[in-house]
Amino acid sequence: METMSAAIFLKDTDGQYLLMNQACRDLFNVADQDIIGLTDDAILPSDVAENARTDDRRVIENGEIIEIEETIPTAEGTTVRLTRKSPVYNDEGEIEGVCGVSTDITERKRNEQELQHLKDQFELAVEGGNIGIWDWDMSTDEVEFNEQWAEMLGYSRDELAFSFDTWERLVHPDDLASVTDALETHIDGDTDIYDHEIRMQTKEGDWKWIQTIGRVVDRDDEGEATRTAGVHIDISDRKQAEQELERTSEFLRETQEVARIGGWEFNLRSGMMRWSDELYHIHGLPLDADLTPEEGIEFYHPDDRETIRKPSTASLRKANRTTWSYGLSR
């Protein structure tokens, strides 16, 4: 008992200390010869001492074994203790004292507070960013998800069953095979992260584009995945913009083809030139032909090539737009 790190003490029914081990004496800075007859009023602030007496009465009057968290000021600073108090019985079965075992949980409480602070910050970020969170217990096929996950699809959280079947039912049939394959590939350990874009059906029956990202967070002793967690992000606006851009690009390609208009651009950093498909067609070249700017100039009439080089250089230096009219050779 003397060598234990927990503070151990014994009191009589009047609240007088009968025994303290070394850890307890160090905690209250009490000498061994001063223990007998000492009360909480002598070693604790009045409010802490009153709480201690109240706890002792519960043990003595009701025969309870209680466990309490208490904050105790010491010479080295405030300490948070987890104290377990039990009744002590005599040979006649009567309670004649209180035995206490008190453990320092200051560091644990500090870590809990820091963890709670991080959790609060994360929840604010999730709520503000409208991020859906999912957590799949693979042993039961239960999937826990937050309110944002459900609201993203027009549901409230209590309208959906917490199951893998719920997710499967809402995924677009054309996307289910590919996303399932991506998930299984990650679970098998072939990818560091699971990341896929899918369509999911809303409560109203339409489809939203969702980016689902996750990873295995627990495996058993045999290495089998037991828990996977991740997030859902609504990317419908981005996908709509991409589709609109694709439609615009396709319209431009068709217009250039009809009008026989070709386009090109020159990258100042890489020194590479990119041609539109129609420009390749105009010159009768395959679409995979890789041309340098100088090779591109060779398609112009020999009398115009040097003239082209000069305004091209000047325009690049001044970042100006320039219009030219020259003859082409094929």
Image (cartoon, helix red, strand yellow):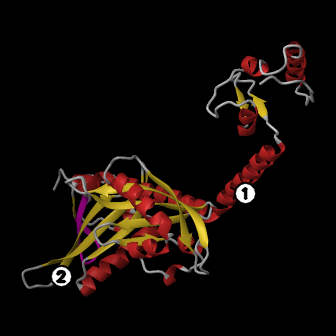
> Is residue 73 at all visible to an observer of this figure?
no
User: Is 160 displayed left or right of 323 in the figure?
Assistant: left
| Disc nearer the start of the sequence (2/1) | 2
Task: Estimate the spatial distance between the alpha carbons at disc 2 and disc 1, rounded to whole Å.
Answer: 82 Å
Which is more foreground, mark 2 or mark 1? 1
- Helix, strand or loop at mark 1: helix
Residue 307 is drawn in which quadrant?
A: top right
User: Residue 5, image x and y in percent?
Assistant: 24, 52
Amino acid carrying label 1: it is Glu
The residue that label 2 is drawn on is 95
Residue at the spot 29% in from the left edge and 73% down from the top edge = 15
Residue at numbered disc 1: 244
Question: In the figure, is residue 326 to the left or right of 146?
Answer: right
Q: Residue at x 77, y 25 (%)?
A: 330
Relative horizontal placement of residue 277, taking residue 136 as reference (left or right): right
Horizontally, residue 61 falls left or right of residue 133, namely left
Residue 327 to residue 239: above or below: above
